[in-house]
Amino acid sequence: MQVRAAFAALLAALMATGCATAPEPPAPPTTASGTPSPVASAPAGADRSAAARKALRALEREYDARLGVWALDTGTGDFVDFNADERFAFASTFKPLVCGVLLQQASDRRLAAVVRWKAADVVANSPVTARRTARGMTLAQLCEAAIRHSDNTAINLVLAEIGGPKAFTDALHDLGDTATRSDRIEPAMSDVPPGETRDTTTPRAFATDLGAFLLGDALPDPRRALLADWLSRPLPLSAEIRGGLPDGWRVHGKTGTTANGGRNYIAVTHPPGRAPLLLAVLSTRTDPSLPTDDTLLATALTKAVTALTP
């Protein structure tokens, strides 16, 4: 409950500015005499964030890429922001958020209802639903398939259940996210050429949305636990991405890959003995013909995390 209360305060600060500017870190705790306790030194944190931004800028040059990073320590309010309010294609990182909206809206009975579809509805990258067309799946099973296996048909069916892309956009707006816009379904939504605004978000907005579902009050406890379980058991991350986070951290995260060389990752991470961190790293290659590179994503994660947990 303490984590949820602390995150709620930070979320209020974020949403007060419409996810447009970074919140001021909370005032440091005080001792009984009213003297600030020597917990997180703001100047030192600012120096580390500045160093991280410099390193991220160098990464952009090295990999011929554009990076967007938002990392927030929910315990101290320290953050790293780099192009945090620029637009990027969100690709499959939207899947846990769509399921978060479903968990807000659907009754237990509805979650257990079997959904059926036709073979013609099955799109590319649907490893689970392609085998279950004859039998169907419950909405809860579809969410699990969408998050754990990044099943595209599964998320299209869940998206239809909540009312489609416009309804998803509106639901995030109700959380305070005025940046994200969802327009299409999979797989077309992952094709976002330069200058396109359809199916885009910002690193700050998407990380904050995920935090609202997993750490805030957007979901009741049982539904929050269900979403966290789906996110804690995805298909194995590449060794490069997992290597970008320290060993021993609990991670609830989702990757995404765009049609134009972009690679994304959003997560709530739990360092031992510390408050959770919100992380979002979104990327795109300057030359869309270049392949995705998980080393770029992992290195960006490491730079952000190191700045917050020196």
Image: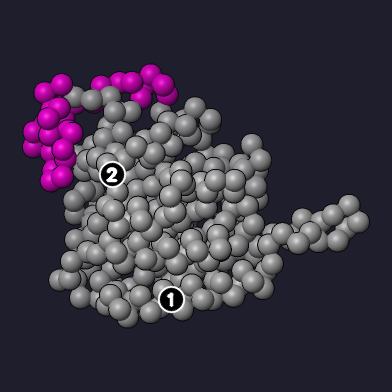
Task: Tell me what residue is drawn at x 38 percent, y 19 percent.
Answer: 109
Query: Which residue in the protein does label 2 denote?
Result: 236
Say whether residue 33 is left or right of residue 114. Answer: right
Image quarter (top left, top right, bottom left or bottom right) of the C terminus: bottom right
The residue singled out by tag 1 in the image is: 55
Determine if residue 160 is in view. Answer: no
- Disc 2 to disc 1, how far (Cα)? 27 Å
User: What secondary structure is marked by label 2?
Assistant: loop
Residue 61 position, x and y percent, is: 32, 80
Q: Quadrant of residue 301?
A: bottom left
Q: Amino acid at mark 1?
A: Ala
> What amino acid type should be assigned to the residue bearing mark 2?
Pro
Q: Is residue 212 left or right of residue 281?
A: right
- What's drawn in magenta, residue-wise? 107-135
Q: Residue furthest front?
A: 247
Q: Quarter of the image containing the N terminus? A: top right
What residue is drawn where x is 59% and y is 48%?
274
Disc 2 and disc 1 in contact, CB within 8 angstroms: no
